[in-house]
Amino acid sequence: MALLYILAGANHFYNPSFYETIMPAYVGHHQLLIYVSGVCEILLGVLLLSQYTRRMAAILIMIMLLVFLWLHIQMVIDFYKNNDKHLWIAIVRIPLQFVLIGWLYSFTHPVKQRVK
């Protein structure tokens, strides 16, 4: 999970044009938001690595995923309106957000060790 977010965040710097194309026109400061969200993903991915910061990082990533859910919904709407051949990818991304949230939730409740 940590590697997933570190790589996803790095991709904001490697391929910012991808994120530019999926951001709604009514949101300003596209380039700034792309880089800030990339930094956040990298930082939160790194924080997932430590048992001391893992719970906090997981909660913050869950919040981030919920906040950006509107972006994925808007992407479905835009792809549908434009008859985009990648509509199916946009649709799949929405339930994937909830899969990721469920996975992250498991980081918020550490497994208890059995008493021998």
Image (cartoon, rainbow, N blue to C red):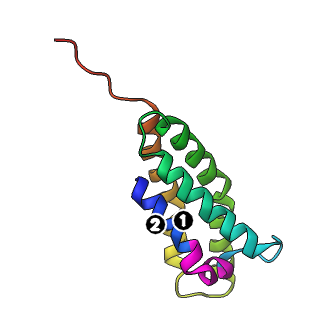
Q: Tell me, for residue 100, which label it has, or none.
A: none
Q: In this view, does 81 lie to the left or right of 46?
A: right
What x and y, as percent, mark residue 46?
Answer: 48, 51
What x and y, as percent, mark residue 14?
Answer: 54, 79
What x and y, as percent, mark residue 79?
Answer: 63, 81
- Check the image and report above or below for 98 versus 85: above
Q: Which residue is drawn at 63% across and 58% down?
A: 69
Residue that label 1 marks: 9
Quarter of the picture holding the C terminus: top left
Marks 1 and 2, how far apart at CA: 5 Å
- Check the image and report above or below for 64 versus 94: above
Q: Tell me, for residue 7, which label it has, or none.
A: 2
What x and y, as percent, mark residue 93?
Answer: 51, 66
Quick check: is 106 in the magenta stretch? Answer: no
The crowd level at tag 2 (other Cα within 10 Å; few <14, some 14-19, many 20+) is: some
Q: Which residue is drawn at 60% across and 65% down?
A: 38
Q: List the single residue furthest toward the left.
A: 116
Q: Nearer the viewer, residue 14 or 80?
A: 14
Magenta-tinted stretch: 12-21
Quick check: is 17 in the magenta stretch? Answer: yes
